[in-house]
Image (cartoon, rainbow, N blue to C red):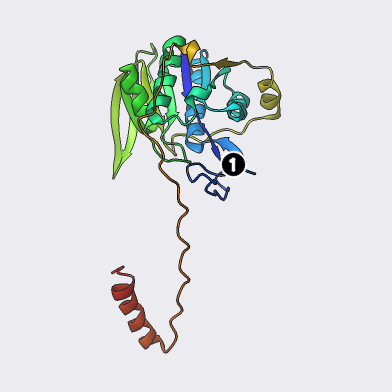
């Protein structure tokens, strides 16, 4: 069974992101880049499916600049068999639909039985690529899954989505697209052997032309990025407890409009 996992390289969660000079991009100076955490759940689940079945292939794919190879190396160190890097200047500034179309072209070439993604990337929080990819392919899709089971014949997949008070259970025919949610599994850490072995694994570079893609014009563009306004300082209410409580309630109701 071949499983393709779409990943994205994003700034480390500990990074203090700053708006760039053009107000349309972030300042990448000094940023540490990582695999988007939700994508790690997708990679881990793909590896577990392969291990449970005792055979198969897990292929990681990303659309991004040269530095995105580092993210692919991380997935190879986790255990993916090979990787595909779609790296083309024509895709710079791609929106989610453009990215989905590029990934769909890779899927058509690779012909996997299952595609896994993270529920969303933590940089832009769009959460749209998985569903858009499924729409472009004409495949069924289940998002934010908390559990999954592929049947023995790899014809269907049974998935669970968390809702208030329980799980929604769906059964989808394969091939399908699934997006992973936190709680689906616990991603493994790459071992030293895995890190060393990743250096020998294939990362295939593809251009838009290799995928048969024509001109891809983004339908969504960033007008401007703005930093969040500074948080106002807190207020300490002085006085006797009874009076302080009354003032606190008044401030919450009339000033903060919180109650």
Quarter of the image containing the C terminus?
Answer: bottom left
Could you tell me residue 201's position as x and y percent? 64, 17
The residue lying furthest to the front in this view is 22
Q: Is residue 72 above or below residue 19?
A: above
Could you tell me residue 30's position as x and y percent? 65, 44
How many marks are shown on the rendered structure? 1
Residue 118 seen: yes
Viewer-proximal residue among 61 and 17: 17
Q: Residue at 35% across / 13% down in the picture?
A: 155
> Mark 1 — residue?
28
Q: Quadrant of residue 105?
A: top left
Could you tell me residue 132's position as x and y percent? 34, 26
Could you tell me residue 244's position as x and y percent? 39, 84
Residue 159 seen: no
Q: Is residue 194 left or right of residue 65?
A: right
The residue lying furthest to the bottom in this view is 240
- Give SS at disc 1: loop
Q: Quadrant of residue 137?
A: top left
Q: Residue at 33% across / 83% down in the picture?
A: 246
Crowding at dot 1, Cα within 10 Å, few <14 / some 14-19 / many 20+, comes out as: few
Q: Is residue 1 left or right of residue 188?
A: left
Viewer-proximal residue among 193 and 137: 137
Q: Residue at 61% across / 34% down in the picture?
A: 189
Viewer-proximal residue among 45 and 243: 243
Q: Residue at 44% across / 11% down in the picture?
A: 212
Q: Is residue 236 above or below residue 218?
A: below
């Amino acid at each position: 069974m071949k499983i393709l996992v779409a990943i994205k390289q994003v700034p480390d969660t500990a990074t203090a992101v700053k708006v760039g000079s053009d107000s349309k991009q972030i300042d990448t100076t000094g940023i540490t880049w990582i695999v988007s955490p939700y994508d790690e759940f997708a990679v881990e689940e793909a590896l577990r499916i392969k291990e449970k079945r005792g055979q198969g292939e897990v292929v990681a794919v990303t659309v991004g600049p040269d530095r995105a190879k580092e993210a692919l190396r991380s997935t190879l160190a986790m255990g993916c068999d090979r990787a595909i890097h779609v790296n083309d200047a024509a895709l710079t500034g791609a929106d989610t639909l453009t990215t989905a179309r590029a990934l769909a072209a890779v899927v058509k070439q690779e012909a996997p039985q299952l595609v896994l993604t993270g529920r969303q990337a933590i940089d832009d929080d769009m959460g749209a690529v998985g569903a858009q990819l499924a729409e472009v392919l004409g495949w069924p899709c289940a998002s934010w899954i908390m559990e999954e089971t592929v049947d023995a014949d790899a014809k269907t997949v049974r998935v669970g989505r968390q809702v208030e008070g329980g799980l929604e259970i769906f059964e989808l025919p394969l091939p399908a697209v699934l997006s992973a949610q936190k709680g689906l599994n616990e991603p493994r850490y790459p071992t030293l052997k895995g890190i060393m072995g990743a250096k020998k694994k294939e990362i295939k570079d593809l251009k838009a032309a290799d995928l048969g893609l024509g001109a891809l014009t983004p339908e969504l563009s960033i007008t401007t990025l703005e930093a969040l306004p500074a948080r106002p300082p807190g207020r300490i209410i002085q006085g006797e407890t009874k009076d302080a409580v009354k003032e606190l309630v008044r401030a919450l109701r009339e000033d903060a409009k919180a109650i």
